[in-house]
Amino acid sequence: PLLLHVGPADLVIDLCAAPGSKTLECLELMREAGDDKAADAGVVMANDADAERCFELLPLITRKARHTGTAVVLGSATKFPSQFNSQGEQLLYDRIICDVPCSGDGTLRRRP
């Protein structure tokens, strides 16, 4: 997240968010970049395809982030649905974090 230059009002999605360190760092960078007027103006969506990891992520984000613009979403990054605002316009993210799981031999044996 450090190289993304996240702004305080950015719309960010973390597609493979668990265990949550990248999401929390992104939220911290957003707060550091903003002033009091822009506090918590941005949104970070933390997505993961594994339900168990998502349920572990939710209390961590809730407890440590305390940011009103945070959502935890369960879904596949390969088939992530389009999202629309209240005017019917498709949302486009300012920053995308996608730290995909390792496809090494050990991972493939555990999760084929």
Image (cartoon, rainbow, N blue to C red):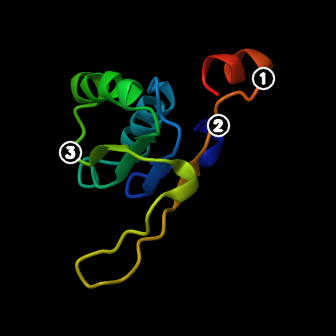
Q: Amino acid at mark 1?
A: Gly
Q: Are marks 3 and 1 in contact (CB under 8 Å)?
A: no
Q: Are marks 3 and 2 in contact (CB under 8 Å)?
A: no
Distance, label 1 to label 2, CA atoms, is 12 Å
The percent coordinates of residue 65 (x first, y second) are: 29, 30
Q: Amino acid at mark 2?
A: Val
The percent coordinates of residue 76 (x first, y second) are: 49, 48
Q: Amino acid at mark 3?
A: Thr
Q: Which residue is mark 3?
A: 68
- Helix or strand or loop: what does disc 3 sit on? loop
**Picture residue at 52% right of the left edge, 58% below the top:** 79
Q: Which residue is mark 1?
A: 104
Left or right for 9, reference 40: right
Question: Which quadrant does the C terminus fall into?
Answer: top right
The percent coordinates of residue 39 (x first, y second) are: 26, 48
| Disc on the earlier residue, 3 or 1 | 3
> What crowding class fits label 2: few (fewer than 14 Cα within 10 Å), some (14-19), or many (20 or more)?
few
Which marked residue is nearer to the observer: mark 3 or mark 2?
2
